[in-house]
Every structure is written in structure tokens, then in C-alpha cells.
């Protein structure tokens, strides 16, 4: 790997922190940072970097600017597995392990710098990117096509509510049609029985029918249809 040109890398890193909107990160700008992303990650993690000029006054600013680049570019929402781990197609397995360990250490809560917060899902996304690149590497013998894993969502899938069973849905809507029909039939039978029990009674508790003339008066009983009187017991 070619050593970085610090006369270009340091100004680009500091300028990106000051004015990040000036650069199109989707087109890998600023280029010195993407071309030497290993050095940027080492700076962000506080590790020694080969060839870095001894500048005690600007050292803390470089570390802060490097962490800003990792947080806003590599861990930005929607970034793919290559961007998350700072890799390019054709990477070596040792490079994958090295970048993965750097990112895990960098985003660990124990190494968090005061006033700087990493995304809450940083560790989850880093682990997922590592798993995806590792499995793809095994299938392709260490070589990945430029479009491999393109469009893979790095966000965990939300848990969808399980649909309620059919019985629960019917209960939520109320009584079923069969239950309503049975209830209506039971009510009709009950009302009919009550009407019969509460109607007029004749001799010995039997139901009787009264004849009514057209003018509304009780009609006379035809001969031969009189109800015989009940005889008492013999003396």
C-alpha cells in the first residue's frame, strides 16, 4: 500500500470536518481520504500511523476530524458493507479482520470521546457487514464483484405484528351470523310461550275462545254446545 501524502491528506481531513457539504461522498470525495482510508481509521481509533508528521499542536484536531469522517461517511444511514468497513472489492481477508476490529473498538462505549456519540445501531451494522463480506468472500474465493451485495439493506428488519387468528377476528367483530340467528329464534319461542301462558283461560284451566257478535257483544252459545256444569261429589 502506498504511504499517504500527508501534505494532501491532513488539509483534506480538516477541511472536510469544517465544510462537509462541499464534497460529494457518493463519488468518493475527498479522494485523499478514500484512497488512504486505512490511515484515517487508524487516526480515528488513536492508533499510531506510519509516516504521520510529529505535529503535537494539530494531532488532536486530526483525530477528531478522522472520527468525524468515520461517523458521517462510513456510518451514514444507508451505507453499504464496503463503505462501513472501508474496503474495496478484491480485499484481503487480513484487511477485513483488521478493519472490522478497528471499527468495533472505535464505536465501543468504553472508548467513546466526551461530546461525541456514535449511531445507536453502529455495532449491529458493523457486525452485519462483516458477516456479509465474510460469507461472500468464502463463496467467491476472496474476490467480490463491484456490484456484489449492492442494495443490501444494512438496517435490521422491523418486527411485524402477527395476524390474529380467524377466531379472534370473528370475536372482535361481535356475534357471528349463526349465533345471532339462534338467539333470535330462542327469543321468538320464549315470547310465544309467554303469550300462551298469559292468555284467557276457560274451564279447568284450558284455553277458551269467546264468540263475539259483529256489534261487539258476546254471542249466544248455539244449542247443544253448552259446557256442562261440573257435578259435585255424590251425597
Image (tube, rainbow, N blue to C red):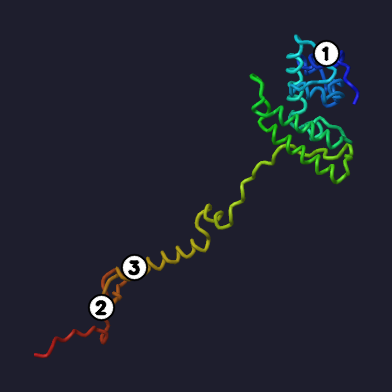
For the C terminus, give its image quadrant: bottom left
Q: Which residue is mark 3?
A: 195
Label 3 or label 1, whichever lies nearer to me, is 1
Nearer-the-camera pick, 34 or 22:
34
Q: Is residue 13 above or below residue 169?
A: above
Q: Is residue 29 left or right of residue 200?
A: right
Label 1 SS:
loop
User: What's the residue at 26%, 85% (across, down)?
Assistant: 223
Residue 59 vs residue 132, the one in the foreground: 59
User: Residue 27 or 177: which is nearer the viewer?
Assistant: 27
Picture quadrant of residue 207: bottom left
The N terminus sits in image quarter: top right
Res 220 label: 2
Q: In the rendered view, does 96 fall on the left or right side of 159?
A: right
The residue identified by callout 1 is: 53
Query: Which residue is outermost to the bottom?
Result: 234
> Which secondary structure lies at badge 2?
loop
> How many numbered discs sit on the rendered protein?
3
Amino acid at each position: 500500500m502506498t504511504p499517504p501524502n500527508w501534505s494532501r491528506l491532513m488539509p483534506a481531513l480538516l477541511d472536510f470536518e469544517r465544510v462537509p457539504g462541499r464534497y460529494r461522498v457518493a463519488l468518493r470525495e475527498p479522494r485523499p481520504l478514500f484512497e488512504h482510508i486505512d490511515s484515517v481509521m487508524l487516526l480515528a481509533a488513536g492508533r499510531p500511523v506510519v509516516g504521520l508528521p510529529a505535529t503535537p499542536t494539530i494531532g488532536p484536531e486530526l483525530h477528531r476530524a478522522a472520527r468525524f469522517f468515520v461517523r458521517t461517511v462510513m456510518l451514514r444511514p444507508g451505507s453499504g458493507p464496503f463503505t462501513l468497513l472501508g474496503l474495496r472489492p478484491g480485499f484481503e481477508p487480513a484487511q477485513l479482520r483488521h478493519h472490522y476490529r478497528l471499527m468495533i473498538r472505535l464505536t465501543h462505549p468504553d472508548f467513546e470521546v466526551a461530546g461525541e456519540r456514535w449511531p445507536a445501531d453502529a455495532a449491529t451494522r458493523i457486525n452485519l457487514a462483516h458477516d456479509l463480506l465474510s460469507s461472500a468472500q468464502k463463496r467467491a474465493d476472496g474476490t467480490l464483484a463491484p456490484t456484489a451485495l449492492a442494495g443490501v439493506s444494512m438496517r435490521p428488519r422491523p418486527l411485524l405484528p402477527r395476524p390474529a387468528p380467524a377466531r379472534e377476528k370473528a370475536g372482535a367483530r361481535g356475534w357471528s351470523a349463526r349465533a345471532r340467528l339462534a338467539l333470535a329464534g330462542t327469543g321468538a319461542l320464549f315470547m310465544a310461550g309467554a303469550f300462551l301462558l298469559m292468555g284467557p283461560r276457560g274451564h279447568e284451566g284450558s284455553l277458551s275462545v269467546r264468540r263475539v257478535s259483529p256489534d261487539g257483544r258476546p254471542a249466544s252459545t248455539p244449542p247443544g254446545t253448552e259446557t256442562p256444569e261440573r257435578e259435585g261429589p255424590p251425597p
